[in-house]
Amino acid sequence: MPTVLHTESSGGHGGQEIRTLAEVRWLLGHGWGALIACQPDSPLFAEARASAIPVEPLRMRSATDVGGILRLRRLIRDRDVSLVHTHSSIDSWLAGVAAKSLGRPVVRSRHVSIPIRRRRALVYRLADRVITSGEGVRSIVIAAGMAPERVVAISAGVDGDQFHAGVSGRPVRAELGLDEAPVVGLVANVRGSKGHNVFLEAARAVLVSKHDARFLIVGDGVGFDEVSRRVREMSLGTNVPLT
């Protein structure tokens, strides 16, 4: 049975990590072997453990962490990994080198739409294929120097069993005191690239004519305090709750 190793050096928890967990669940449910190697103190490690997903705590300190390469080589050999799928910069260097040194193919996922500087694009050349989260991100990877035939856009899937017309929003509305007011939601990792500043400007514009509207910000991240500060400065606190 082929085994796919997913690696993730990020300590965050957002769509990238959620997609990784979903892909591993799918692989395991369809007869593949799969496991995750990630930082021991990361939310991803805790979530995988709680979900009974095979996961190995593996410290990845930097792109030049020789010990990390050796630990990944050992894991690939011991688990007889057939393919390595990397997700962030540091693990793409370490796991990419480890996999190539053992003759294993490498897939790199690029989840975000942040531009890639050409001098930082070398890590993508370790990958046999690059998967992007959409056509826009695919264009960014190609613009950084990757051959178009090696870059494939595959959008993230959605679990239809969790999102359907039978799910009521009333308990959430009651919990957050939203009553029957119109609600606009932004669900995202709170950081600069997610456009929370645009969301707040839109909220202020709409509230001029729709005073009872609510703009719900759901998520956490490095930019949470900054967004909270902007909400206060724009006097939007009553209309823009942050969960």
Image: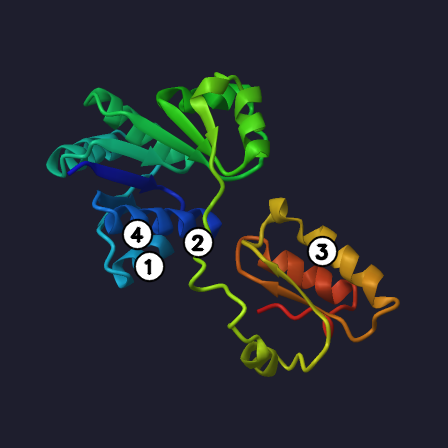
- Above or below, comparing residue 43 to residue 76 in the picture: below
**Image x and y of residue 199, in percent:** 71, 55
Describe the element under mark 1 as helix, strand or loop.
Answer: helix
Label 1 to label 4: alpha-carbon separation: 12 Å
Q: In the picture provided, is 66 more to the left or to the right than 144?
A: left
Q: Are marks 2 and 3 in contact (CB under 8 Å)?
A: no
The earlier-in-sequence mark between 2 and 1 is 2
Badge 2 marks a residue whose secondary structure is loop
Under mark 3, the amino acid is Phe
Q: Quadrant of residue 90?
A: top left
Q: CA distance from mark 4 to mark 2?
A: 17 Å
Which mark identifies residue 13? 2
| Circle 1 Cα neighbour tier, 10 Å, few/some/many (<14 / 14–19 / ≥20) | some
Q: Which residue is mark 4?
A: 25
Q: Quadrant of the N terminus?
A: top left
Q: Are marks 3 and 1 in contact (CB under 8 Å)?
A: no
Q: Horizontally, is 169 left or right of 212 in the view?
A: left
- The residue that appears at 44% across and 53% down in the rendered structure is 13
Amino acid type, callout 2: His
CB atoms of marks 2 and 1 within 8 Å: yes
Residue receiving disc 3: 199
* Image quarter (top left, top right, bottom left or bottom right) of the C terminus: bottom right
Total residue callouts: 4
Packing grade of label 2 (10 A; few <14, some 14-19, many >=20) is some
